[in-house]
Amino acid sequence: MRTFRPRLWTAVGAAALLAACSPGGEGGEAGKMGGEAGEGAATAPAGEGGERAGGEGGAGEAGAAGAYASVPAESRSALRLAHLRGFFLIAREAGKTEGAEAAAALAGQGMLEVYDPAKDAFARTGVDEAVLRAAASKGDRASLDAAIAAIDAARGKVGGSGKDVVKGLVDIAAGLYRHVVADGAVDPIEYQHSLGAALSAKAEADRADAGAEAAAARSEIDAFVKLWPATAAPDDAAKVAEPGKVQAQASRIQLALS
């Protein structure tokens, strides 16, 4: 049986996540759920409206806070959207083998960890919240596709540098990955969250308006994504890449971006 470091998601279960992320769910309570159970909260840099720039709370998500601090202010709205997109991308991938309930739970985690703590900032991007909530409730391929399209449409309107966004996403992915293996066990939640950020970095670099630097880093980003052997975390810690290997590839991407 797989064992891993306890997190809020394993405690509340998919049903609670679906309820919290449904259109009728209570946003205030959902926001409170965004941190990690039993871990001290990390303070992320303030966003445009005074929100935390990073959506993720808790010591295990410190990579997200640092990533937001590292990008220029004019690219933070774009990074925030792309960070959220990562959760819907990994949800869509997980849904292929794990089903709609698992996909909805992953999308719901993105809403709780990234969207809800910066809800006002997301509102200013024009992204359709109802479309996002529907995907986090249903978890089916059509609703997830619609949510990703809505995020991409908003991303195209907010501006910001594709290079900066890729950089931030790679930092988030590598930062989260440091916590994938703890005490010899694989944490499947951290694994999928970090993979989602990596997938979103690839999606960002593939954008037509990503810029020359982001386009130049595509081959290194492809190699980065391949470090996750599957959508779901392996049970055996020996089958996942060492954090140092992930960080080394992240550094290659940063070099390509520069």
Image: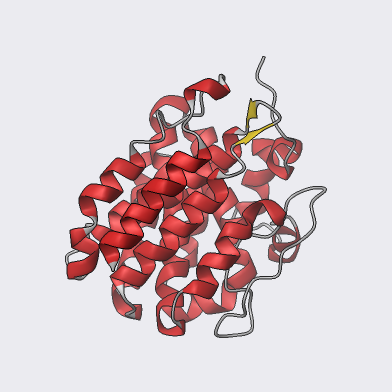
In this view, 168 is above or below 223: below
Q: How many marks?
A: 0
- Residue at position x 48%, y 34% from top? 100
For image coordinates 47% across by 68% down, the residue present is: 80
Residue appearing at x 49%, y 73% in the figure: 70
In the rendered image, residue 77, in percent from the top left (x then y), is placed at 45, 76
Q: Nearer the viewer, residue 211 or 255?
A: 255
Query: In the image, is 10 to the left or to the right of 168?
Result: right
Q: Quadrant of the C terminus?
A: bottom left
Q: Quadrant of the N terminus?
A: top right
Q: Position of residue 169 (x, y in %)?
A: 43, 59
Quick check: can you spot residue 131?
A: no
Q: Position of residue 88 (x, y in %)?
A: 44, 49
Q: Position of residue 5 (x, y in %)?
A: 72, 34
Of the pair 257 and 111, the residue shown nearer to us: 257
Residue 103 seen from this side: yes
* Front residue of this view, candidates 84 and 128: 84
Q: Is residue 161 left or right of residue 59?
A: left
The residue that appears at 28% across and 73% down in the rendered structure is: 156
Q: Quadrant of residue 237?
A: top right
Question: On the rendered structure, is 207 left or right of 54?
Answer: left
Based on the displayed image, in which of its 4 quarters is residue 228 positioned? top left
